[in-house]
Image (cartoon, helix red, strand yellow):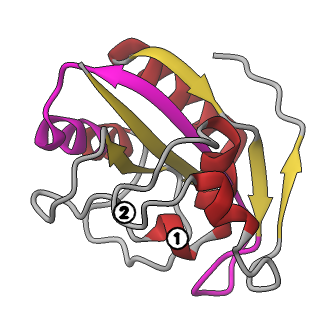
Amino acid sequence: MARIFISIGSNIDAEHYFNVALKALTDHFSNLCLSSVFESEAVGFKGSNFLNMVVAGDTPLSVAQVVALFKRIEQDNGRSLGAKKYSPRTLDLDLLLYDDWVGQIPVELPRAEITTNAFVLWPLAEIAPTLLHPVEQQTYQTLWDNFDKSQQKLWPIEFHWCY
């Protein structure tokens, strides 16, 4: 059983798609732990604000199976296969960590966005503050404490789940 960390993002009907995502994650993973929901400005393009969060869960699935599942959930919820990286989206599910596995195939793990995007690092530090980044060898809380917070505007919001 692997412990995984998942980034969820949306800026199109975000409340609806967050509830859809949480229902799907509940159906496929156990022992879920949810961060707060954060609102942030779009990064890399001009667009509506995003909602973001991080969810931890346990799975017997392989990295490849998890990634394929996330792609299917995204596509089932209106995400097109050829969508540009920096564009509005209904649902974005990214595998951040798979235990302490480090590799490039089928996806880069740990995901680089952990150390470069506040909307990933802050919620990750919230639910796994003492966990060590497998490459940086610092805790996520330490990485967050040292993060240049002037780079990105981000704030926690109240969110009402209805899945």
**Image spot of residue 2 (x, y percent):** 27, 26
Q: Which residues are magenta?
A: 41-70
In the image, farthest residue toward the front: 137
Which residue position is annotated with label 1? 115
Residue 80 vertical position relative to residue 26 in the rendered view, above or below: below
- Residue 102: quarter of image: bottom left
Residue that label 2 marks: 111
Q: Is residue 58 magenta?
A: yes
Please report the residue visible at 44 percent of the width from the left and 56 percent of the height from the top.
133
Q: Which quadrant: the C terminus? A: top right
Closest to the observer: 142 or 88?
142
- How far from the left and from the top, in percent, is residue 156? 85, 50
In this picture, is 124 found above or below 84? above
Residue 35: x %, y % from top left: 68, 36
Q: Is residue 159 magenta?
A: no
- Which residue is drawn at the image coordinates 64% and 36% (left, top)? 127
Q: Return the x and y of residue 88 as percentages of the image width and height.
A: 56, 69
- Crowd class of label 2 (few under 14; some 14 to 19; many from 20; radius 10 Å): some
